[in-house]
Amino acid sequence: MRKCIAIAEEIDKEENSGLVSGKCNKAEFMAHIEERLHKTQAEIDNLQLALDAVYGERSIDFKYDKLFAEDRNFSQNEFAEEFKAQIIKEREDHIELLKKIVGFVTDKEGNITIADFRKESESPSPHLI
C-alpha cells in the first residue's frame, strides 16, 4: 500500500516540477501500477473500476493522500479493499507454489537441499505453475 502512495507521489512530483500537490493523474497512476507491481490486465481492470468508484469515472486526477484511509468503522474504500484482496491472493498463490516446489524437489526420505529449492523456485517447472 505504501508503494501505491509512493507511486502516486512520484507522478505528482513529475507533473508539478518536483512539487507535491496531493493529486495525481489516474491513467498515469494505473499505468505505473501495472508496470511496477506486475499486475495482470484483469487486476488492473478491477483496480480501475474501484478507483473510478471512489473518485468518479470522469475525473482525470485524484487526491491520493486518503487512498487507504479508514473511516470511523475502520472500513476502507473500494480501491483499498480491491488492492488488499489482490495482495492476499498473490501471497496465497505464492505459498501454494512453494508447497508444490518443496514436494517436487524432496527426495524419498523427505530431504531437500537449499540448492535444489533455490533452483526450482527461481524457474519453476511448467507442471508446478
Image: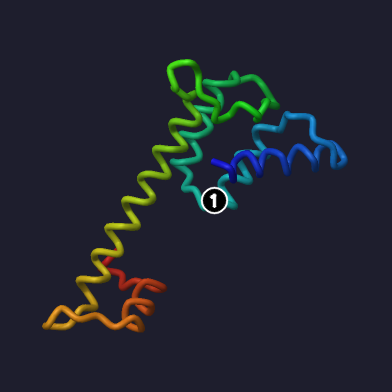
Badge 1 element: loop
> Could you say which is closer to the camera, residue 114 or residue 33?
114
Task: Give the x, y percent position of residue 79.
Answer: 50, 29
Task: Give the x, y percent position of residue 94.
Answer: 35, 57
Farthest residue in the top direction? 72
Q: Which residue is drawn at 50% across and 34% down?
A: 47
**Rendered-image quadrant of the C terminus:** bottom left
Q: Quadrant of residue 86?
A: top left
Q: Which residue is drawn at 54% across and 50% down?
A: 37
Q: Residue at x 81, y 38 (%)?
A: 15
According to the image, label 1 marks what residue? Answer: 37
Q: Quadrant of residue 8?
A: top right
Give the answer, above or below, for where 38 lies relative to 97. above
Give the answer, above or below, for where 96 lies relative to 65. below
**Rendered-image quadrant of the N terminus:** top right
Task: Give the x, y percent position of residue 41.
Answer: 48, 44
Q: What residue type is labelled 1?
A: Leu
Task: Give the x, y percent position of residue 92.
Answer: 32, 50
Q: Decide if residue 17 is on the left or right side of residue 92.
A: right
Q: Decide if residue 103 is on the left or right side of residue 83.
A: left
Give the answer, above or below, for where 118 lies relative to 128. below
Instruction: Check disc 1: other Cα within 10 Å, few if <14, some if 14-19, many if 20+.
Output: few
Farthest residue in the left direction? 108
Q: Decide if residue 79 is on the left or right side of residue 3.
A: left
Count how many numbered circles sit on residues in the image: 1
Identify the coloring. rainbow
Q: Which residue is drawn at 53% across and 32% down?
A: 48
